[in-house]
Amino acid sequence: MPPQYLPIVTPTESVLQRASKTSIVPSPSLYLLPSTAILMLCIMPVHAVRTAGVVGGRPRRLCIFGKAGADLHPGAQYRLGIAELNRELGLSERPKEGVKWLKRSAEYATAEFPRALHELALLHEKGLDNVVFMGNIYAAELLAQASELGHAPSAYRLGECYEYGKMGCPQDPALSIHYYVCPFSS
């Protein structure tokens, strides 16, 4: 792990170590603290490099993600969804489960965690066999929701859509410029 990250990671590791010694998953209020939750989500994928203080290895980490996801933490739900879709964290590829987690995360999306809306939009743009129908208009709506939350890649994608008339969006130079400039206005 790069040395510049160690001062940030160490406090979160100690919280996770204390929680693992009691063999109780930390209270749901721990996941509502933005810095702790973000740091935990950053640490957990590094299962091959460090154990992150969680006794029990990979199954225990997945249990913590599942608990955070069940407690409606959009970041944990997004991470579980991506892991199910891309065979990460030692999970097998289960697209239906991945889309389910992404939909849950999109339902509770915040300005801090808008990525699930963007990922769902990409899935609906291309479609996923027997899991996600292809729907450009719905994909554009999801991109608009994500860009309203300040997600720059979604705003850029919508700018392209309105510039070239893609995904059922009419060609509109004013809206195109609005979405291209949107990430810089906040």
Image (spheres, rainbow, N blue to C red):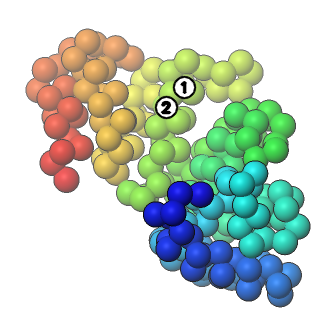
Report the front residue among 107 and 93: 93
SS at mark 2 in the image: helix
Q: Do the residues labelled 1 and 2 touch (CB within 8 Å)?
A: yes
Q: Can residue 37 be seen in this view?
A: no
Q: Name the residue under label 1.
A: 124
What is the crowding at mark 2: few (fewer than 14 residues within 10 Å), some, or many (at least 20)?
A: many
What is the crowding at mark 1: few (fewer than 14 residues within 10 Å), some, or many (at least 20)?
A: many
Residue sitting farthest toward the left: 174
Residue 29, how many percent across, how many down? 60, 81
Residue visible at 48% across and 45% down in the picture = 115
Q: Can residue 35 be seen in this view?
A: yes
The total of numbered circles placed on residues is 2
- Residue 71 appears in which quarter of the rendering? bottom right
Residue 45, how many percent across, how many down? 67, 53
Q: Mark 2 points at which residue?
A: 121
Q: In this view, does 130 lie to the left or right of 1?
A: right
Residue 106, how many percent across, how many down? 53, 48
Where 122 falls versus 185 (above or below)? above
Residue visible at 22% across and 34% down in the picture = 179
Report the front residue among 46 and 87: 46
SS at mark 1 in the image: helix
Report the front residue among 164 and 45: 45
> What's the residue type where badge 1 is placed?
His
> What's the residue type where badge 2 is placed?
Ala
Where 121 falls versus 133 (above or below)? below
Residue visible at 61% across and 44% down in the picture = 102
Residue 127, how many percent across, how many down? 60, 20
